[in-house]
Image (cartoon, rainbow, N blue to C red):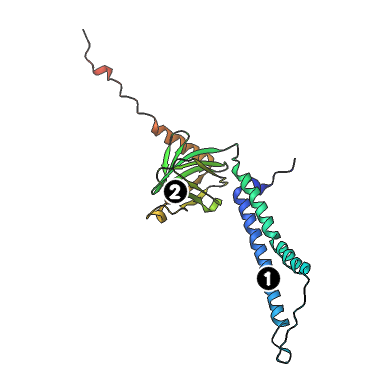
Amino acid sequence: MAEPKAYLADPALGWDRLWHEVIVDITIIGVLFALLAAWFIWKYRRRPDRQQGEPPKLTPAAGVAWTVIPVFVFMADDFFLAANGWQLWNTYRDVPAERMEVQLESGMYSWDYTYANGVKTQNELRVPAGKPVVLRMTSRDTLHSHFIPDFRVKEDSMPGRVTYLWFHPKKPGEHLVTCAEYCGVMHSYMSGRIVVLPPQEFEDWYAAEAAKLQPVPAAKPAAKKTKKSA
Ligand SMILES: [Cu+2]
């Protein structure tokens, strides 16, 4: 079996690699066309003594070849990028087995997260460093899109459907979350953050929040104060 490629295991690395390819490709193509254009401008510059041009006569076969071959040459990079993007996307749709699952309900205008143990947070998702996180998303009103630019992931949340998104936070830090689907007048204020904590710190917070959810035990009847029944 082939060695799994690191950029296929991490969406952020994969998208960055593809984006880098795009930049390199358009730079090469841009420079090439600029040089070609400059050369044509010089070669076919206006010559007062010899105004009448002499266009070369092409056979139909040569005309087709001159059209088709350059098109494929210049589209080779598009095919390459499309194939790689397709592969990366398909790989990304498979969620890593070792992961933390969090439910997300979006609404105008907040991100409401619910952890497996019932803990709920709003507009702030705390996660442990070093573990992939999967969001199972839905919406209670209209379309929103949960976008985490730092992790290069974005996915719509929709009423009546469950969509998903995953990312792999590697080290502690904070990352912006923003809504990327116009959802109403307060859309631009619909932001939140991902707080990546050291694993132990996360576990402590997670357990402490869960403890708050436990129903407070009913006060025991104060045995000593009750009168003795004779
Ligand atoms: Cu929104």
- Pointer 2: what residue? 143
Would you say the beta carbon of the disc 2 residue lies within 8 angstroms of ligand 1? yes
Residue 92 appears at what percent x and percent y? 61, 45
* Mark 1 vs mark 2: in front: 2
- Pointer 1: what residue? 31
- The residue nearer to you, when weighing 70 against 23, is 70
**Secondary structure beneath disc 1?**
helix
How packed is label 1: few (under 14 Cα within 10 Å), some, or many (20 or more)? few
- Of labels 1 and 2, earlier in sequence is 1
- The residue nearer to you, when weighing 200 against 121, is 121
Q: Determine the residue positioned at 67% across, 52% down.
A: 83
**Above or below 126: residue 22:** below
Q: Callout 1, which amino acid?
A: Val
- The residue nearer to you, when weighing 139 against 24, is 139
Q: Callout 2, which amino acid?
A: Leu
As drawn, the residue found furthest toward the top would be 230
Residue 97 appears at what percent x and percent y? 60, 36
Query: Which quadrant is the N terminus positioned in?
Result: top right
Q: Is residue 132 found left or right of 204 in the rendered image?
A: right
Q: Is residue 29 found left or right of 175 in the rendered image?
A: right
Q: Is residue 131 found left or right of 217 in the rendered image?
A: right
As drawn, the residue found furthest toward the front would be 60
**Distance (Cα) linking label 1 and label 2:** 41 Å
Q: Determine the residue positioned at 74% across, 64% down.
A: 69
